[in-house]
Image (cartoon, rainbow, N blue to C red):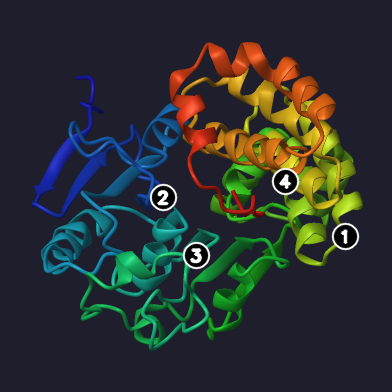
Amino acid sequence: MTKDLSPRLIFDGPDLRLVYVPAEKRGPLVVTFSPLVHQDFDPPVGFGQEFFAKRGLACLCFISAWPHWWQVPDIEKALSIAREVVRQHSRVITYGSSMGGHGALLHSRALGATTVIAAAPQFSIDPAKAPFERRWRHRASKLTFNWDDMKAGLAPKARKYIIYDPLSIDRKHVQRLRSPRIIRVGLPFSGHAPLAYLSHIGLLSDTILSMIGNKFSLLSLKEAVRAQRRGNPDYWGEMALALQQRGRYQAAVEALRTAKSLDASAIQPRLRLAQNMWRLGLGEEALQELEEAVTMRPRHEGARKLFASMLAQSIQSVSEDPAKLEALHERYRSAIDSDGELQALISAPKATPHLTNG
């Protein structure tokens, strides 16, 4: 008789759901926690669910209905049900990214984890515990943090892989994690998306599976990353951000040009390239980059507003020179005349274009 391996919804609450996908053999169980950007609550599909199912690994997926960092009453009942599943398996690996990485660490003891894989996790987003963390203050203001004791939640005997960018703010969270058997897997210039970074250079699957199988080699990963990273646009984008924060705008421009050459369809490197060019006084080149960006993505609000802001300031700067003013209008006439919304943005009062982390 063939075993039923279809996903099973074993807990259905207003704030989180729990999906169990069995495997043919009773081996290890991967327990995943969804990240903030996960959209598959209804119908429920867990983080990494398809990846592990295809590889014959059982998985149990905690799926959040909204970005609550697992600070909801449902978590107690869900963990109780999860422990019933855990007892059927030989080993337990908790896994997640960002908010999901936080959950994988926070509930590792409760789930009896033998291995934890947490990418860019937070120690906490409670301002009282992580005052340096401002990225999710608006989210934190809605939470009570009644289930946010990381010290008590960490499984002391579990091998804990923390994948993160040591040059980003995420390192401050990692520094606050105090527990035996923590293995820090630092990936410089991977930003807040080290899993995407590894995926882009073709190393994600092997890395995660080697951690699950207790065969991971940090030295081997670092050698493989060094061999592949220069072809990854995210690497250059994060390098540019680090240079930009140090005021090295020319070097940031060169890094972003490389990122753009590796992925011409990406919009964010173009916007940041234009911003850094603007800071260097390369207004015409910045406008050309933004014109291309708006042409590529006509409805991208950030590109449209930045283009309008820079163009309006360029027009203002040559308002006393009729020849330059006419040349500027002529150069961008088709872009302006064909877009009433862009005309309105240009006519509105403008703030100085600023550098962003986007």
Q: Is residue 31 left or right of residue 290?
A: left
Measured Cα–Cα span from mark 1 to mark 3: 29 Å
For residue 271, side relative to residue 81 (left or right): right
Against 188, is 148 above or below? below
Residue 185 rendering spot, x and y as whole percentages = 69, 62
> Disc 1 to disc 4, how far (Cα)?
13 Å
Q: Residues within 10 Å of mark 4 (few under 14, many from 20)?
A: many
Q: Which label lies toward us, 2 or 4?
A: 4
Q: Earlier in the sequence, mark 4 or mark 3?
A: 3
Mark on residue 275? 4
Q: Secondary structure at mark 3?
A: loop
User: Which residue position is annotated with label 3?
Assistant: 121
- Whichever of labels 2 and 1 marks the residue nearer the N terminus, that label is 2
Q: Secondary structure at mark 4?
A: helix
Q: CA distance from mark 2 to mark 4?
A: 48 Å
Disc 1: which residue: 248
User: Are dots 1 and 3 in contact, CB under 8 Å?
Assistant: no
Disc 1 element: loop
Q: Amino acid at mark 3?
A: Pro
C-alpha separation, residue under disc 2 versus residue under disc 1: 48 Å
